[in-house]
Image (cartoon, helix red, strand yellow):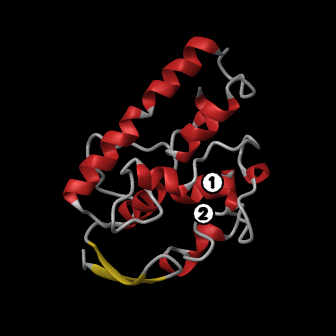
Amino acid sequence: MKKRIVIVNDKMQQGYRYICSEPMGRNFDKDFKPELTPKQMLEMGVFGGKYMTDCRKEFPSSWFKKAKLCAERHDPKLNYFGVNASQPLSVWEKNGWIYKDDPRGWFQWYCRYYMGRRLPEEDRRQIKRWKAMRRHITQIKNNCRKGDLLCRRKQRQALLHWAYDIRKI
């Protein structure tokens, strides 16, 4: 596969470049098995629709055709469960969860990883964080009837933000 160079110019990054060394949506780490693609997540409704409204040029236009987005503000009604399951970026920064190359956080990392970018050390860190979210699946299974999507909606929305298909739980 020929490597592709992506140049990013949006509100949070100017002139940032990365290389896609893997085919889009393929050759993931053996420990990373997201259940949803970025496109599916955006269509279902994540991050109150505010995430990624200024960086569409970086990603395939097909991701945004049916995406639930709101450029003006974070609107929890756009989330799949209609609830807010996000923390402000300032909380993420304070906790050291933001990597310098991905100032928007985990989902930006995932989108770029999905596109084919590989950063071994950061990939390991983010995959470890992704795997840690599984504890919420256990809590839902222990406290909700299977298929009861009204049970623990905030927790389900949070799992959706991490590419877990909460409809299966």
Q: Amino acid at mark 1?
A: Phe
Q: Residue drawn 73% across and 40% down? A: 81
Q: How far from the left and from the top, in percent, is residue 104? A: 48, 63
Which quarter shows the N terminus?
bottom left
* Residue 86 position (above or below residue 90): above
Q: Amino acid at mark 2?
A: Tyr
Q: Determine whether the residue tagged by mark 2 lies in a helix, strand or loop.
A: loop
Crowding near the residue tagged with mark 1, few <14, some 14–19, many ≥20 C-alpha atoms within 10 Å: many
The residue identified by callout 1 is 47
Q: Residue drawn 44% across and 58% down? A: 105
When asked about the image quadrant of residue 117, the answer is bottom left
Could you tell whether 60 is left or right of 45 in the image? left
Question: Do the residues bearing badges 2 and 1 touch, measured as CB atoms within 8 Å?
Answer: yes
Q: Is residue 58 visible?
A: yes
Q: Is residue 37 visible?
A: no
Q: Determine whether the residue tagged by mark 1 lies in a helix, strand or loop.
A: helix
Could you tell whether 161 is left or right of 9 in the image? right
* Residue 15 position (above or below residue 110): below
The residue identified by callout 2 is 51
Q: How far from the left and from the top, in percent, is residue 82? A: 77, 43
When asked about the image quadrant of residue 61, the answer is bottom right
Check residue 128 in the rendering and tell me which mark sits there, or answer none.
Answer: none
Q: How far from the left and from the top, in percent, is residue 66? A: 71, 64
When asked about the image quadrant of residue 139, the answer is top right
Say how many tags the image has: 2
